[in-house]
Amino acid sequence: MSSIPYKYFMPTQVECGNGISKKTGEFVKKLGVERVLIVTDKGVRAANLLEGIEKSLEVASLDYDIYDEVEQNPSAETFHRGTQLLKYVKSDAVLAIGGGSSIDTGKGIAVMATNAGSILDYEGVGKIQYRPLPIIAVPTTAGTGSEVTNSTVVTNKETSFKLGVLSSYVFPTMAILDPVLTLGLPQGITAATGMDALTHAIESYTSKAANPVSQAFATQAMKMIGENLTKAYFIGTNIESREKMLVASMLAGAAFAQSRLGNVHAISHALGGGFDIAHGIANATLLPFVMKFNLHACPERYRDIAVALGNDVTGLSVIQAAEKAIDSVVEMNQTMNIPLNIKDLGVDLELVPKLVEDAMRSGNVLVNPRLTNPADIQLIIEKAYHGNLEGF
């Protein structure tokens, strides 16, 4: 356990249940809201996932407008256009519906509705001055946990850099978890988002800033993901596994909101900014290599992870048991057709100097369990590029 002082804080109200998104209007009405801006992407809208939610808003006599321009790795320009629309239509709350990109964008729009300048001005921790508009988050994937976190991530297109904005003001007011909305997810998105959630749980558990509460949440998330992710992948219509994955994702998000993350996220944000790689896929592919790098810094914690993922470690040394955790992650990636190296993701090693520089800007490096310098980041990237887990 870390000696770093901590205070557990999660102000987000969480509502969970099959079909509960059809009560969104009722929940929002209780917040004293009159007009909401729905922030989403065109894929969510085309899949008709808004239909029940829109009806609930109409029943509750709530006006709404829709902003569906969110893209993968959303840019500062996307945040700005959404904020302009919100101010034009005079919405007094943001209803973010979709994956992490939509929820992060919704959070950013709500922040910029009450704060001056650009979202890029608020990179780092605790720089937001004024409380945002109410944020209601409805995830349609089980991955980012953004519905209960104090951060939003935005891409600066001019520098090809993904940056984080962290503040207690960024916690959503409410999260509505409806597994019905995830039943139609394609296998690829189920795999990527599920491994994203697992990465959150593992990095939170091993973080230097971990505390008993964050570790309890992370452990439960890992256990639920280990038991349910491949089931959700292969039997997409299994509502029980879908619900448990949503809850696991939320728990992992609540965990890392307290503890931060680690080198996986530091590097994956650099890859996302530089090559527009989906965040979950970047995390999943990098995870085994960062775990191998960290192994000897916290073997007991990796042994705990191996157990949470269902491994029998009886009779094994601490290191042997810890290695089972890495083996489990590799096996999950293989089972769900996730690349085993970042070369297959389109990464170009010519950009390694910039990737290293961008990764070292991340505060997540500071809480990674093993002390990390630029040469270490370069080693991880090169090993991940070639798919080589040896030599750390």
Image (spheres, helix red, strand yellow):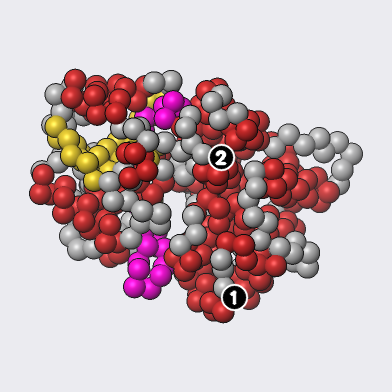
Residue 161 position, x and y percent, is 41, 68
Give the answer, above or below, for where 123 lies relative to 307: below
Q: Label 1 amino acid?
A: Leu
Q: Nearer the viewer, mark 2 or mark 1?
A: 2
Q: Label 2 amino acid?
A: Gln
Q: Mark 2 — residue?
A: 187
Q: Is residue 24 left or right of residue 355?
A: left
Whether label 2 touches label 1, CB < 8 Å: no
Q: Mark 1 — residue?
A: 349
**What is the span of residues highlighted in magenta in the rendered image?**
154-181
Density class for disc 1 (Cα within 10 Å; few <14, some 14-19, many ≥20) is: some
Give the answer, above or below, for where 160 lies relative to 259: below
Q: Determine the image quadrant of residue 40.
A: top left
Quadrant housing the C terminus: bottom right
Residue 117 position, x and y percent, is 20, 63
Which numbered tag is attached to residue 82? none
**Residue 160 is inside the magenta segment:** yes
Q: Residue at x 50, y 76 (%)?
A: 354
Residue in front for this viewpoint, 337 or 311: 337
Q: Residue at x 48, y 66 (%)?
A: 275
Density class for disc 2 (Cα within 10 Å; few <14, some 14-19, many ≥20) is: some
